[in-house]
Amino acid sequence: MKPTSLPRRQRGVAAVLMVLLTGMALTALALGGMHHLRGQQELTRSLRGNSEAQWRAWTGVELVRQYLSALTPQQIDALEHDGAELNLDRASLPVASRALADALRIKLLPAPRAAGAVVKDDKVSAWITARSDDASVTLEVVYQLGGAPVPPSANAAAQIRGGLSTSGNIRVTGAKDALLQVEGAVDTSGSLIGVSAIQATGDILFQGNPAREDGQAPLSLWSNGDIRVNSGQFLTLKARGNITMGSGSDVETAAANGAVSSSGERVGRLAAIGDVTLAANVAISAQLLSQGDVRTSSSNRLNALRAQGQLDSRGNANIDDGIIGGAFSHNGAQIFDATGQPRQLPPGTVRVRHQAGLKVPLEPVPEFRLGATRINANDYRDAANLIIYWDPADRSADTLQRIRIRLQHMAGVPDGAVYRLGRQRADDWQRNDLCPALQPDGKRCAPVSGQPVLRLCESDAESCLGGSNAQQWLLKLKPPQGMLPGVVLFEGNLSLYGRLDNAILATGHIETSSNVELWSLRQAGAARVCRSPDFPDAYPLNHCSVDRNALRESPLLGIALLAGGYDAAQAFSGGKIKLGASNRIHGAVLAGDTLDTAGSTHIFGPVSAALQSRPPGSPPPSRPLNSLGAETVIDISGQNGLPGEGGGTPNPQAGAARVLWARYR
C-alpha cells in the first residue's frame, strides 16, 4: 500500500507558501537583530550618560564643600534659613568645564526646626542633581561644619586627651617629623623610637630612652607645665613651668617660663625667666640667659652668661664671659655686691662683670593647645552599609534570632532592608547568611521577593556573632574570608577577632584580645572592597565607583576603628578602645574616650583619643588615662591613602566643611 500523494497543483502552492514563510522569518530575524542592536546602542548610550551624570554630581559635591568652607557662619545661617538655590558662574569656569554650569542644579535644604524655631547645629544638607543626555542623578549630601574625626596634622601620629603613659617598646615610623600631641600629662618609660616631638598641656616626665630613626633629629618636648628628663639626647625642651634635666642628659636648647636645673652632660642654649641651678659637670656650650639668679657647682663650664639676678658659683666653675645685674659669690665668698662694688678678686677661671639695671629680654614659652576633635559613631549612621543591633521586642530564647542587621547602600539590596541571621543551604549547620526572613524553625532562610540572601561572614562556630548578648557584641571570624565589606556600625560594645576589610564603628567600647587584622576601605582598596572574590554579589554603592574599579572619596575610607557616640540629647557613651594580644590595624584608630594598647600592636595610621566622657569644664585627670604599651608600632606613612588601585584620592578636608555622608536619591 502506497501513501497518498498530493496533486501537482497543490504541491506548487505549498512550495510558494514555504518560500513566503521563509522570507517572512528571515525578515523578522533581520528586524529583530536590528532592534537588538539599536537596543544595545541605546543601553550603551544610557550607561555612558549615567556615568557622566554621576561624575558631574560628585564634582558638584566637592564644589559645594569648597564654597561652604569659604563662608562665615553668619553667611551659612542666612543661606540655610529658608534654603537656597546655588548656581555656578559660567564666566569663571574654564571653557572645557562650562557644561557643568548647565548640568548641575544645587539646592541647600532649609535648616531643621523645632516648634517653629531654627535648630542650630553644625551640619548643612544639600541636594545636588546632575544631568547628561537623558540621564539624571541626584545626590543627597550632608556636610559637617568645623572639626574632623581624624588628626588634622599630617604628621600627628597620635592626638590624645586625658594624658598618656608609655611603657615597653613604642615605635613611630613613616615620618621624620612625627608628633605625639597630648591634652594632659605625659609619663614615659621604656623605649620611645621615631618621635620627633611630644607636645602636652600638662607635665612631661620622660624616664625612657628617646631613641630615633636614621636621619631623624633628636626628640623635642613642649609642655604647658613642667618637664623632667632623666637622660638621653634632646633637641629642644620648652616649658611654661619648670625644667629639670637629670644626669646623662644632653639638650641643645632649653627654655622655661619658670626655673631650670640640670645635672646632665651639656646644654647648648639655656633660657629661663626664673632661676637656674647647674650641678655636677654640666656644660653650657652656647649661652645661659636668665631673668633670675644663677647657681653653679662642681666643674660647670659656661661660655656666655647673662643674668639679671645674682650669681653663686661653687667648685671649679669656668665662666668665659659673664654679665650679671646682681651680686657675685664664689665658694661662699662675695666677689662683688649687688651694686657692683668689688669685695675680693674672683678666681682666674671666672670672668664675670656687673652691669647695673641689666635686662635680659626673653620671649615666654607660648601655650600649646590641642585642636577640637569630635568622634561620634552616630555621625556616620546614614553612611554605614551594615547596622547591627539587638531587637528588644524579640523575646526569643535563641539569641541569634534577636539580632537584626540593616543593609544600606548595598548593591542588589533594597535600601534600609532589615535582615536576620540564618542558613540558606540545607547542608549548612552554621548561621552566617543574611536572610530577609526566617522559616518557623528560626534558623533557615525564608524567601522574600526582591531581597536576595547574602553571605555575611565565615566562622568556626555556629555564627560569627555567636556569644553576643544585648549591647555586647562578639565578632569572631574565620580567616581568610572575613566579613561582607563596607562600613559596619555596631550598636553597643564590641569584642573583635579575625581578618576584615571594613571600617568598624561602635557606639560603645571596642576591644581585641586575639589575632586581629583589619584593613580600612582605603587600604584594602577597590579590588577587595568593590570586587571582593569572597563576596562577589554585594558591594557598598556609596563607597565604590560605578565601574567598581575605584573608591569614592569619603572621610570613612581611612578609618579602621571608631568607638563612642552621642545620643539625641548629646549625652556621650562608650568610646574606649583596648587593643590586646596581636593586632595589625591598617587605618586610623579613633577612640571617643580613651585608648589602651598592649601585646603586639601594629597600627598603620594615626590614633586619637578624645576623652568625651569628661563633662565640659571639669579639671584634667590626676593621672594619664591612655596608655601605649608592650610592642606598639604606629606607622603614619599611609595615613592619607596608599598608592595603587582603588586607593582613592587624598583629600585632607582642611577647610571648614567636610562631607559627612552622601547617598543617591
Image (cartoon, helix red, strand yellow):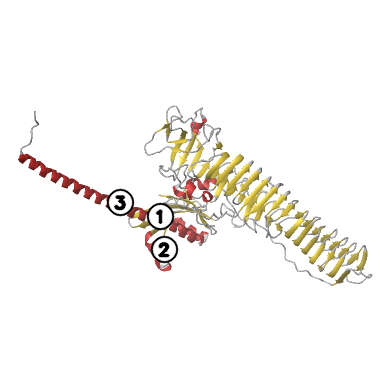
Residue 555 coordinates in the image, percent (x, y): 52, 52
Q: CA distance from mark 1 to mark 2?
A: 18 Å
Which comes sooner in the sequence, label 1 or label 2?
Answer: 1
| Tag 3 and tag 1, C-beta contact below 8 Å | no
Residue 86 coordinates in the image, percent (x, y): 42, 60
Say which mark, if any, is on residue 88.
2
Q: Residues within 10 Å of mark 3 (few under 14, many from 20)?
A: few
Q: Is residue 509 visible?
A: no
Q: Is residue 511 left or right of residue 255?
A: left
Q: CA distance from mark 3 to mark 1?
A: 21 Å
Q: Residues within 10 Å of mark 1 (few under 14, many from 20)?
A: many
Q: Is residue 413 left or right of residue 522?
A: left
Q: Nearer the viewer, mark 3 or mark 2?
A: 3
Q: CA distance from mark 3 to mark 2?
A: 35 Å
Which comes sooner in the sequence, label 3 or label 1?
Answer: 3
Residues 289 and 153: in front is: 153
Q: Residues within 10 Å of mark 2 (few under 14, many from 20)?
A: some
Look at the image and tell me in which quarter the N terminus lies. top left
Residue 508 coordinates in the image, percent (x, y): 57, 41
Name the kind of residue labelled 3 in the image: Gln
**Callout 2: SS:** loop
Which residue carries the number 3 mark? 40
Name the kind of residue labelled 1 in the image: Gln
Q: Is residue 651 left or right of residue 612?
A: left
Which comes sooner in the sequence, label 3 or label 2?
Answer: 3
Name the kind of residue labelled 2 in the image: Leu
Q: Quadrant of residue 452?
A: top left
Which residue carries the number 1 mark? 54
